[in-house]
Image (spheres, rainbow, N blue to C red):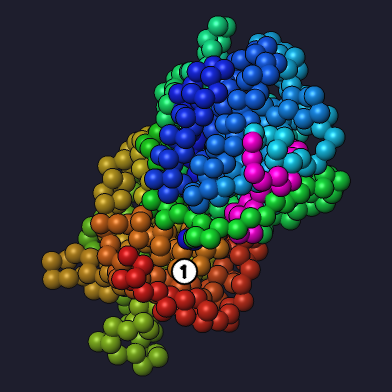
Amino acid sequence: MYDFYRVAAAVPDLKVADVVYNKNKIIEKIDEAFKAEVNLVAFPEMALTGYTCGDLFFQKNMIDKCKKAVKELIAVSSILDMVIIFGAPLLVNHQLYNAAYVLYKGELKGISVKTFLPNYNEFYEKRWFSSALDLDIKELPLSLVAAETDDNYMIPVGNDLVFSVNNDFKFGIEICEDMWAPVTPSSWLAMAGAELIVNISASNDLIGKRDYRRNLITSKSSALLCDYLYVSAGSGESTTDLVFSGNSMVAEYGKILKENDVVADNNYILISDIDLGRIRADRVKSKTYKDTYRVYGNDKNIRTIDFNSVDVFGSDARYYKIDAHPFIPNGRRKRLERCKSIFAMQVGGLIKRLSVTGGKMVVGVSGGMDSTLTLLVCAQALKKMGKPMTDLTGITMPAFGTTDRTYNNAVVLMETLGITVKDIPIKEACLVHYNDIDQDIANKDITYENVQARERTQVLMDYANKIGAIVVGTGDLSELALGWCTYNGDQMSMYGVNASIPKTLVKWLIDSVIKEELFPESSEVLKDIIDTPISPELLPPDENGNIAQKTEESVGPYELHDFFLYYMMRFGYAPSKVFFLAKMAFNGLYAPEVILDWMKMFYKRFFSQQFKRSCMPDGVKVGSVALSPRGDWRMPSDASAALWMSEIDGIDVKFDE
């Protein structure tokens, strides 16, 4: 199932202290979750009794009813391949504990006990409950917690339990206030292997508390490299002095996947798929994560409770949102803010380099998006440094494929920026070189193209030497991944400001410059540039003078390649999972056969073109995916792609559908 699992937060209708009513409502939500093919469903803190029972917790009648309800819920779970977690009191050795019961396939697998009991402001938990720190046993017989049961096996109990299904799906539990502690039980549970933390809670609502709670959960899931399922008591709780929000959410590694949006919510179920592949990928990389447990956690003696699923335990990910453009933030406002930050980082990196080399720069300007972004970064750097725009020289080098549209856009852009403009046609130089190497001009092969690319680089380098400047490169991350650049041609520069910018993001970075009006005189030409087809312009235009050589027709859609790159690099996913995700993300846009064909090209080129990345110029890293051999990516240039290509060849498109 590609490491996907389905979880649910269930908040049933509730009557305070009416255990029978509450048990029946829990069963209704269990049935609803099972029909949705949920793998784990969690109910709020004290879901059987209600959290606001007060001194009624001391009533023997209610505790006895809880034991009967536990027995019935165990029976309900016997025919379900689904983990069920609910909150209820636990009476052990004349002490009451706030506990979470874990059921699976007709067995009570363990009971997690709350450690930190709030006893301030509106909370009085220590009046009724004892902490897990006071628990002097590690297990107890079923007969102590479930009434009139025929079985009497021993049940693990405590705050030190990690539950493991098929030695694969591992989760731990903390209860409400545990999450608010400076050092939380989930810290040890996660470092001992739990990939999902479940928090059953009864958190009342206050102004601003929802945002604070959300920040706590996203921060915790990020720090622990885990998924976090949070479920809180709903508005069915007593409102004598408080109101309960029923706020539930699922977070994955710092990001909210799903959250209810109704204040004072009740009687609902929140379902989300989670991708533990993300968690597992980063835990493999993070040695700090493991070292933390070695330093602080060895004395915790976390226990792992293993149990097996007969059926396939996982999900088809239909509740998981797969972003077709993972490098681009969703939403206009967020995208603009992100682009502004990235642009500032590009400018900042270049300013540092210029502080060493001097302020003069040379850029090859084609009228395409990549060189445009580079030019804008250079111009903004000069502006920040208080240097004249004429310290930046833009060079157009029209050749056999240059069109009027791109040439004119290049010239207008440079003029409106107020930089130094140089126009150096390279046709004659290329013709001389074709003659020198016996290249037939009629043969429009790779040599025909690369001669032009290398001639452009020679002009840039030599002119930079002439004026004491550096050549600022224009190549982007997507081109580096595919090797869609000429070795010792446009692959080379003295500093690459776009080195970690994917092709799908370049357009939006330029768009942010337009919206921020950083260079208002250039806005109109910038709008036309981002509407121009992507092309190296190394082959002649068509009969109407338009661009004939369109990159994406040769190498494939960049939105697909950026998608492949992100999931392969960021999480190390195998081709089969990347294909699975791509089908969902691009459903209705690309047929599965088309996706698979371009995927084959991506992996083939990614491996075969590593030699270009092994000697790439310095360049600033701005995102989580980068290919610098000095930074994120260390790969031998002669590594074999056989394993990856073999897996791709084994993908059955019809079967996978």
Badge 1 amino acid: Pro
Q: Which of 395 and 337 is in front in this view?
A: 337
Task: Give the image location of residue 487, x and y in percent.
Answer: 49, 75
Q: Residue at x 35, y 39 (%)?
A: 514
Residue 620: x %, y % from top left: 58, 53
Pointer 1 residue: 575
- Decide which of 208, 57 is in the foreground and name it: 57
Q: Position of residue 168 (x, y in %)?
A: 61, 58
Regarding residue 203, the answer to whether it shows in the image is no
- Quarter of the figure with residue 442: bottom left
Residue found at the far top of this picture: 240
Which residues are drawn in magenta? 148-171
Taking 483 as reference, is 404 left or right? left
Position of residue 291 in the picture relative to residue 638 (left or right): right
Q: Nearer the viewer, residue 135 or 315?
A: 135
Residue 625 drawn at (x, y percent): 54, 56
Residue 577 lies within the magenta run: no
Check if residue 152 falls in the magenta segment.
yes
Q: Can residue 451 be seen in this view?
A: yes
Identified at 38% across, 51% down, the residue is: 318
Q: Is mark 1 on a helix, strand or loop?
A: helix
- Going by the picture, which residue comes out furthest to the bottom? 438
- Specify whether 332 is left or right of 45: left
Neighbour tally class for label 1: few under 14, some 14-19, many 20 plus, Cα within 10 Å: many
Which picture quadrant has residue 431? bottom left
At 56% from the left edge and 53% from the top edge, which residue is drawn? 276
Quadrant where the image shows the C terminus:
bottom left
- Residue occupying the point 57% across, 31% down: 69
Q: Identify whether 334 is placed above or below 430.
A: above
